[in-house]
Image: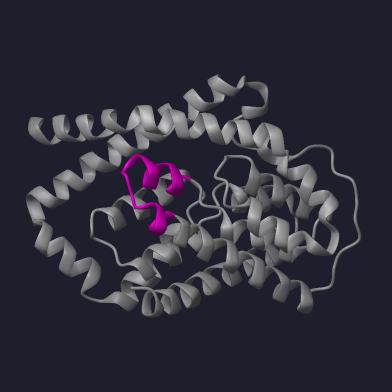
Amino acid sequence: MLDILWDALLDTLKLLPFLFLTYTAMEYLEHRWQGGGLLQKAGRLGPLWGGLLGVVPQCGFSAAAAGLYAGRVVSLGTMMAVFLSTSDEMLPLLLSRGAPAAEVLQILGLKAAAGIVCGFLIDLVHRRPQANQIDALCEEEHCGCGHRSLLAAALFHTLEIAVFLLAFNIVLGLLLHFAGENVLQRVLIGNPLLTLFLAALVGLIPNCAASVALTTLYLDGLLPFGAMMAGLLVGAGMGLLVLFRLNRRVKENLLIAAVLYGIGVVLGCVMGVLVK
């Protein structure tokens, strides 16, 4: 048990410098780009901007998109484009684990493309709502990053994800110790279709722990590419939680979550077949 705890702690500590540098860069981009404001001005090109800006993983963007949609400032397609493209904690983990640049760009490109295409298709069949003003963007519903300095926000995120990583590494270490890596691999990869549905279900969890788990399992060779993509496409960070909190149309929220899940499953299946 001590060996498992020690190994999990060492694995987590090794990533801290890379995570901090990555989050510092992303906080800079968030402060500079002001993604919520860009979405408000995007108009009919909202899904394009949503898909492109969503790949920058920072805590408030999917939440802001949900708040803007709840206030009927942006279209449903724009919000869904952000939800599908946002990578949450995937990018910092890929970079900190030294994933090849080509693989990172491929994953980000697929998520952005999925968000843009699906966003425009959704707007074609869903009437664009009338724009209304909302009092505040919903990133404050998450962690209050707007009230912290750039470095303080980056440090907060680094420590937050470090805690999730440490906990997940301990759980994974225990599973590998008692079940064995071969057994766990057979369970996760033995039934690809079931694994894909389960991964997409994990993606619905409105917490960065979901993307941490999915990305770590993929990098450790325990989760197929298609299943990881299904979970990450569905994973909208805090976006769904903010949507359910601010949008009083409960049936609409449930339908949005179901459509998001369905898109993730279908596209994850297709990507798993096409991308080797």
- For residue 110, side relative to residue 132 (left or right): left
**Left or right: where does residue 72 sit relative to residue 240?**
right
Q: In which quarter of the image is the N terminus?
A: top left
Q: Quadrant of the C terminus?
A: bottom left
Q: In which quarter of the image is residue 20?
A: top left
Locate residue 152: give its quadrant: top right
Vertical position of residue 196 compared to residue 157: above or below:
below
Q: Position of residue 5 (x, y in %)?
A: 16, 32
Whether residue 23 sits left or right of residue 269 in the image: it is: right
Q: Does the magenta stretch include residue 24?
A: no
Vertical comparison of 46 with 2: above or below: below
Question: Residue at the spot x=38%, y=47% of the render?
Answer: 94
Q: What span is in magenta? A: 89-104
The tally of labels here is 0
The residue lying at 48 percent from left, 31 percent from top is 157
Q: Is residue 214 above or below residue 37?
A: below
Relative image position of residue 125 (x, y in whole percent): 77, 79
The image position of residue 176, as x and y in percent, is 13, 51
Q: Tell me where residue 135 sits by quadrant.
A: top right
Residue at x-position 65% and y-position 45%? 61
Can see residue 32? yes
Is residue 257 visible in the rendered image? The answer is: no
Q: Residue at x 64, y 56 (%)?
A: 52
Q: Mostly what secondary structure, the magenta segment?
A: helix
Measured along the vertical axis of the image, is residue 30 above or below residue 265? above
- Tell whether position 103 is magenta: yes
Q: Where is residue 232 in the image (x, y as percent from the top left)?
A: 46, 59
